[in-house]
Image: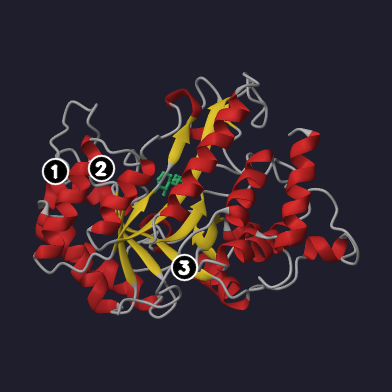
Amino acid sequence: MSFRRVLLLGAVGVVGAGSLLLGPTSAFAQAGGSSGAAPVGSHTDSLRDLGAKVGLRVGTAVNPAELTSSTYSSLIANQFSVVTPENEMKWEVVEPAQGQHNWGPADKLVAFAQAHHQLVRGHTLLWQNQLPTWLTDGVANGSISNTQLRALLKKHIQDEVSHFKGKIWQWDVANEAFTNPWDPEWSGTPAPGHFWVNHLGASILADAFKWAHEADPKALLFYNDYAIENVNAKSTAVLNWVKQLRAQGVPIDGIGFQTHLDTQYGVPTDFTQDMQRFGDAGLKTAVTEADVRTFTEPNSVNTPTDTNAVAVQNAAWKQSIDTCLAVRSCISFTAWGVSDDQSWVPTTFANPQEGAALLYDSNLQPKSEYFTVQHELATTEAAHRTGIGAGRS
Ligand code: XIL
């Protein structure tokens, strides 16, 4: 980041401070001595306070086990107004042995969120990944029939949504049910090749939304997917599918745009036009898992191999937050984790090594990408979101 940019952002910080308080005063400001000018790069203009100006919730995925670190937990409390458990509401975690529930880690995050006036995105009820092995083994060896599988899914959704009833703002009911246009099995419909659709037919997705709605009628119910951040074959297929379901009365309220971006594929240029199509169809929208990965030096999750990559990463974060601000139906903007080293990217995209995908470095210091998002939130004129904090009407 250039010195000039630091100065500019410092000025924004001073102008924006004051009337925007939603959460507790920044621990960073307290630690740094809050009287007088804020130190360069300070957190006094938190993302959550800036988002609150237009009713936008700004969030992060959280690993609840790490909340014991006071640096991590105060950063999350101060910067974010909505949290998503990164893994702790997935089926393999909440029911590791059949009939034995493990709600503890997710309960801990929900309690943390309530204590810090944050909302919670529930993630995720129907997905083909991170299923418990008792379930996938049972299906593979034939001891669980399709009829039983359907009953097990229904019970899972009812149990989980009931357990958290009244505490979840948005549920990602179904996750990644479409394949991709570049896959051989692409069909433009919820996917052949998808575990649930293969076994139970595409109507299982509608059933999942109905079961979730019955268990918590006030929660906003989302379909969540990736590679839909442009006007493209997949986003168009998702839009047509969701419109059709809504016309049949299926309770789907919104679409989550995961927004896992990568500098090698460039910045999504028509993201705003794309998301607006969903808003125009009466859907709420959200950026649910934002990160922008790039190639990094081996063994260094923070150091891009190409120094020009940082400019592209900043442009991608700018485009993502600008899209969410420009489209009034966009009610939350969530990064998929806090710091580069904790991100899923280095382990998932390891050959060749990618990383540097988030807003904070491994020392929990804000990166230039953080200041880009902060700057856009502070300076962009945007319409106030409605229904924030409230469930479905
Ligand atoms: C990822 C988590 O970040 C990892 O910790 C875990 O090992 C695998 O899942 N799309 C999703 C998320 O919807 O649930 C995934 O999260 C990332 C891709």
Amino acid at pointer 2:
Ser
N-term mark: 3 or 2: 2
For the residues carrying marks 2 and 1, which lies nearer the camera in this image?
2
- Residue 384, disc: 3
The answer to which of 187 and 29 lies nearer the viewer is 29
Secondary structure found at label 1: loop
Amino acid at pointer 1:
Thr
Instruction: Judge whether 257 appears above or below 180 on screen.
Output: below
Q: Residue 114 appears at what percent x and percent y?
A: 56, 77
**Local crowd size for mark 1, using a 10 Å CA cut-off: few (<14), some (14–19), many (≥20):** some
**Local crowd size for mark 3, using a 10 Å CA cut-off: few (<14), some (14–19), many (≥20):** some
Instruction: Judge whether 9 appears above or below 234 on screen.
Output: below
Amino acid at pointer 3:
His
Q: Is residue 258 left or right of residue 290?
A: left
Q: Which residue is mark 1?
A: 189
Q: Residue 324 appears at what percent x and percent y?
A: 44, 53
Cα separation between marks 2 and 1: 11 Å
Q: Residue 294 appears at what percent x and percent y?
A: 54, 27
Q: Which residue is mark 2?
A: 235
For image coordinates 58% across by 55% down, the residue present is 377
Q: Is residue 208 left or right of residue 377?
A: left
For image coordinates 18% across by 43% down, the residue present is 237
For the residues carrying marks 3 and 2, which lies nearer the camera in this image?
3
Number of dots carrying numbers: 3
The answer to which of 331 and 121 lies nearer the viewer is 331
Locate the C terminus by quadrant: bottom left
Q: Is residue 214 visible?
A: yes
For the residues carrying marks 1 and 3, which lies nearer the camera in this image?
3
N-term mark: 2 or 1: 1
For image coordinates 58% across by 50% down, the residue present is 376
Q: Residue 128 appears at what percent x and percent y?
A: 28, 47
Secondary structure found at label 2: helix
